[in-house]
Amino acid sequence: MLKRIVFSLALVLPMVIIAANTASADPDKLATLRGSALNKEVKAPPIPKVYNDDKRQVRSYPEQPPTIPHAINNYQIDLNTNRCMFCHSRKAVQESQAPAISITHYMDRDGQFRAAVSPRRYFCNQCHVGQTKVKDLVPNDFVDIDRILQEKTKK
């Protein structure tokens, strides 16, 4: 019986401490990326413009999914239709001149190649995102490996 009580206290006590600390937090003093207190309603920032120049963006790291270099507003991607395939399927690339999707998108989870896009790769915007012209929310000092190697060879 005593073991049950000690065990129950061991489970409940951390939750009580966390709840007490959360309840006592002053919403005016919490640091957020939105630039204002959590308990204040602020005007939403304008929706940023999307890069729409159809130029391929440089990838920041190996195996990074390519970004989408054009607007995709109102693109239908659901169980019935994938608007991306109108231009990026193997059949459409000759006419559209868009890059074809990678052969890996036709591979199923067992490594077998399929005639159609694998269901796990069908929803493009799970990995591929459009780029917008916005200021970084947090400082970023990322340096691409190619730049690091160039600087080392110059020295």
Image (spheres, rainbow, N blue to C red):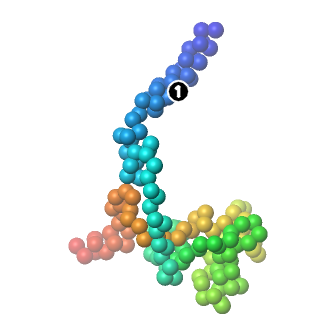
Residue drawn at point x = 64 percent, y = 8 percent: 1
In which quarter of the view is residue 146 placed?
Answer: bottom left
Quadrant into which the C terminus falls = bottom left
Q: Is residue 129 visible?
A: yes
Residue drawn at point x = 49 percent, y = 73 percent: 50
- Of all residues shown, which one is farthest toward the bottom? 95
Residue drawn at point x = 49 percent, y = 28 percent: 19
- Of all residues shown, which one is farthest toward the top? 1
* Residue 15 rendering spot, x and y as whole percentages: 52, 27
Q: Is residue 14 visible?
A: no
Taking depth in this image into account, of 23 and 127 the one nearest to the observer is 23
Taking depth in this image into account, of 48 and 85 the one nearest to the observer is 48
Q: Amino acid at mark 1?
A: Met
Residue ID for mark 1:
15
Taking depth in this image into account, of 68 and 26 the one nearest to the observer is 26
In which quarter of the view is residue 61 placed?
Answer: bottom left
Number of numbered discs visible in the structure rendering? 1
* Residue 69 rendering spot, x and y as whole percentages: 52, 77
Taking depth in this image into account, of 149 and 135 the one nearest to the observer is 135
Residue drawn at point x = 59 percent, y = 72 percent: 73
Relative to 13, 114 lies left or right: right
Relative to 124, 45 lies left or right: left
Q: Secondary structure at mark 1?
A: helix
In which quarter of the view is residue 65 placed?
Answer: bottom right
Crowd rating for badge 1 (residues with CA inside 10 Å; few <14, some 14–19, many 20+): few
* Residue 80 rendering spot, x and y as whole percentages: 77, 69
